[in-house]
Image: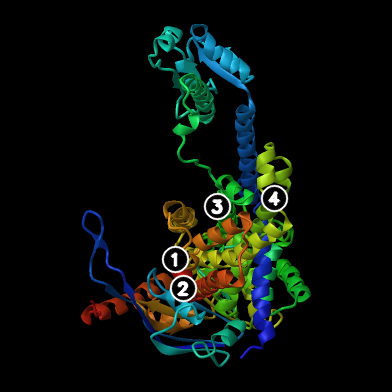
Amino acid sequence: MRPLASVASNAWVVYRKEMADALRDRRTLAVVLVTSVLLGPLVLVALSAFVASLEERAEKREVVVAGIEHAPTLANWFARQTVVVKPAPTDYEARLRASRLGDPVVVVPADFEDALRRGDVPVVEVVSDSANKQAESGAARVERLLQGYNRERATLHLAVRGVSPELLQEVQVEPRDLASAQSRATQITGMLPFFVLMAVLYGALNAALDTTAGERERGSLEPLLTNPARRVDLVVGKWAAVASLGMLIAVLSCFSFIPAQWLLRSDTLSALFLYGWREALLFLAVLLPFAAALSAVLMAVAIRCRTFKEAQAGTSIVVLAISLLPLATVLNQGGEQPWQLWVPALSQQLLMTRVLRGEGFGVEQVVVPLVVCAALAVGGIVAVARALRAAAVR
Amino acid sequence: MIEVQGLAKRFLAPGASRGLLGLRRAPRRVVEAVRDVAFAAPDGAITGLLGPNGAGKTTTLRMLAALIAPDAGRMAVDGIDVVARPREALARMGVLSDARGLYPRLTARENVVYYGALQGLARDAANARAEALADMLDMKPLLDRRTDGFSQGERMKTALARALVHDPANIVLDEPTNGLDVLATRALRDALRWLRTPAGGGKCIVFSTHIMQEVERLCDGVVVVAHGRTVAAGTVGQLLAQAGERDFEEAFVKLAFAQERAARRAPAVAG
């Protein structure tokens, strides 16, 4: 039997070599850093710019009307509401369709005033395009404005006839929103965990393939096994290097959201998106075990492939699963289910969403994903160690 | 000292795909790669494993390197049983296998030192060995270059240095001259001849080849392998006498061909 120290030192030798090797692959590293570490914050910033422009429009007291000259009473109402009326461009339909006009258009018919006087109900159109997000978000505001006008006239008519307007309102409806500010923000920041998961995946993927299928393709696995090192030591060293890279990317991407907040343009979003050191550390507590498990699984898949290319095809199943599993939270309207904590990727998504909502998580929610990750890591390492010798000579 | 007796190995080859989508498979085929290989390679001598392509040379050497478990037979390196104590046997062997891939992003020195560390050498010792081997193999200028873009000869030198980093008493090389030009081949031959001498360490060197000239020029002992069997063994002179030929190539064909006729008379088990 070899002493324990030499077993550990073999894994350490392999670890150091694989890290040096992977860190010298500058081009791949650069691509991973740009796509996975910068992408999340960039999307966050772009999102905030979008939200900011929506907010601007919501606050803007403007309404675009076609044919305001037919409706002096409506113009008077807008003026009393301190809303500025802007004439609609003649080709407003085309512009709305092409998303070049960001406001819905109120269309007043030519006989508006006559119809009102006769007691007919004139039709006022609010023209928008549901594919045009900006115009669509303004449509509700314009409709509310027109309802106000409607209500005022109706109330006046009832008052003239001596009827209390309260008769029209037997029940008073008041909305009460239970969502905290943070949980409202997760509607927008909910994609964050997805970006972080993908970052970890792409951080580990290249090294996982290079240390297994890549080693086979180069023909360096067979000579490696002619060293008097135990196969499991070799695999543990390789796995530790792959997992370290995944974890490195996890750390970088988790902390990259902290400076990204300074760039948030929307005040509302930056007030809602509370992401500080505590949240980053909780994210890491979820992601580091996941990186360890994912590395082992990717390696176990890739060691069965003869070439890097073949391994890329093989691991695309894992990539697909990790991108699709979190969708379960979108498709499943039943809320969090206990079984979801047993599903890798999905459980990480759940826990990170909880952190963003400001709810945090207890030990009992971490134990299950942790056990699953540990089992996957050990299973993956054993599978690679078993497959190693056969893979070397085939 | 390497001793091999009654070595045998059969593989189950997956059947060829059939049908439009390749989903149906032919039944598995039994391939008897090695049936009965035996040889003894003494210290301070170069022993050539000579045989045509597919004779079972690579499989034999892979079993010797503990990469494949044999079905039958016994292999010992300096008296250490390879099957029972593979890691101890490997520590006494330097193996240049058929596949000799290097790590392209590491320098030649790093490639060599990596294997030294895996053999249990301290960093300084491994570095010193890398320098000494670079001297012997005439590859000093290569040492601190990344191996990406090395020529075949440069790759072979690096791979050989890597295999010899722990100064093993036994050296096993699988078709080492494959893909090498004349100069690289001569350099390799010189290195092997030197390693055989007492000054070079009096190593036990076993190498496989299918090239006659290689054997004639280099080997103290020759083991002729055909169809997975050792069919003849001895010095070049002894084999010429045994075959009754003056040309070594003729002698080799005669020895291997006789075996082939014997194999035809007693057909192999096919599944």
Front-most of B42 and A246?
A246
Q: Position of residue A301 (x, y in %)?
A: 46, 64
Circle 2/circle 1 CB separation < 8 Å:
yes
Q: Helix, strand, or loop for circle 1?
A: loop
Element under disc 4: helix
Mark 2 vs mark 4: which is more N-terminal? 4
Residue A366 position in % (x across, y down):
58, 69
Q: Which residue is mark 2?
A: A387
- Chain of the residue under label 4: A
Q: Which residue is mark 1?
A: A304
> Dot 4 corresponds to which residue?
A256
| Residue at numbered disc 3 | A194
Cα separation between marks 3 and 4: 15 Å
Task: Name the mark nearer the viewer: 1 or 4.
Answer: 4
Q: Could you tell me which secondary element the residue under label 2 belongs to?
A: helix
Q: Is residue A72 above or below residue B114?
A: above
Q: Looking at the image, is mark 2 or mark 1 earlier in the sequence?
A: 1
The answer to which of marks 3 and 1 sits earlier in the sequence is 3
Marks 1/4: CA–CA distance = 35 Å
Sequence-wise, the earlier of marks 1 and 4 is 4
The label nearer to you, 2 versus 4, is 4
In this view, A69 is above or below A158: above
